[in-house]
Image (cartoon, helix red, strand yellow):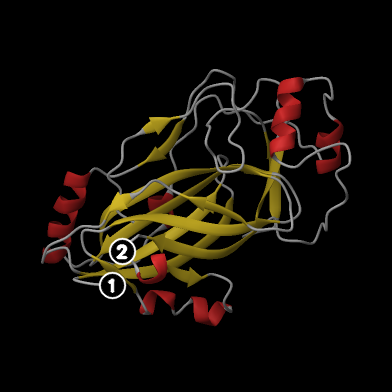
Amino acid sequence: MFHSHSFGVGPSRLSPYNGGAYCTRPREQPTFDLLDLSNHSSRPFGPFVADHRSPCHHHTSHNDINRNITLAMSHAQDPSIADDELATTATAGYKVGEKKSLAEYSQLDAEDESLARWKASLGIGASTGAVDPNAPKLSLHSLSLVSATAPGGSISINLQQPKEQLAQIKQNPLTVKEGVEYSVKIQFSVGSDILSGLKYVQVVKRAGIKVDKMEEMIGSYGPRAEPYEKAFASSEAPSGMMARGNYSVRSRVVDDDNNVFADWEWAFKIAKDW
């Protein structure tokens, strides 16, 4: 939701594996193809250049958030969040490359130790079996706001509800206690291919005024039966009379090539208590 943590980069020459701790990939890393679920089309893209660092996350400053909240209180505008407001920052050193299948990746450069470690982190090996080509490349299970002060430690949105129920999420905002420390966590599954360079991006508005934008690296993941979880850096919810009220949110999961894997709207309410 609201971000006040510092801007950061990950170490070079390391891949963004299982949890996205790092922001660059090995020089000889194979290229990938990701699917845009909105039109079922795909196009290949390739590795970052080694030693070329890229931002892991981007945030709106705390002062800007407070200023935007004040502006929103006095200027009601269109509450919708447009596609261009969810645009992500470009990643330096990014190159388009040749598409390869999961089986081809498993056999690629078996003698390259760096590449072997990268493939192992994604669960890719010579024994990698066939995957269901009809399985969704990415399925979102839930979004949670995790806080030590929250009832049960977190509050969650079930993103696997029928489409009609998902459309009602923004009409039933999550209640967040003002001033608490919290972190956003998503749970998801990867089904039929390797997904690389995934990012989570969201825009928060109040009364039609954008008050915050969050962009976080998720990382690279291979197909497996068990779901993955990714928790992002902690933030502090705003507090005070001016901050209390309802906020609308639009969230996306995208890759560095701006293919969209998930896109949904939801809402939260800042209140005196959970």
Q: Nearer the viewer, residue 236 or 3?
A: 236
- Given this view, does label 2 or label 1 mark the residue nearer the observer? 2
Residue 166 against residue 40 in the figure, above or below: below
For image coordinates 61% across by 31% down, the residue present is 15
For image coordinates 82% across by 37% down, the residue present is 125
Residue 222, position in %: x, y?
71, 46
Q: Amino acid at mark 2?
A: Thr
Residue 162, position in %: x, y?
58, 79
Q: Are marks 2 and 1 in contact (CB under 8 Å)?
A: yes
Number of numbered discs on residues: 2
In the rendered view, does 240 fall on the left or right side of 263? Answer: left
For image coordinates 18% across by 71% down, the residue present is 272
In the rendered view, does 210 fall on the left or right side of 127? Answer: left
Q: Where does label 2 land, which residue?
A: 149
* The C terminus: image quadrant: bottom left
CA gap, disc 2 to disc 1? 9 Å
Which disc number belongs to residue 115? none
Secondary element at tag 1: loop
Residue 26 against residue 206 in the figure, above or below: above
For image coordinates 78% across by 40% down, the residue present is 124
Secondary element at tag 2: loop
Which disc number belongs to residue 274? 1
Q: Nearer the viewer, residue 18 or 211?
A: 18
In the rendered view, does 30 fall on the left or right side of 212? Answer: right
Q: Of marks 2 and 1, which one's residue comes earlier in the chain?
A: 2
Mark 1 closeness class: few <14, some 14–19, many ≥20 residues within 10 Å:
some
Q: Nearer the viewer, residue 235 or 197?
A: 235
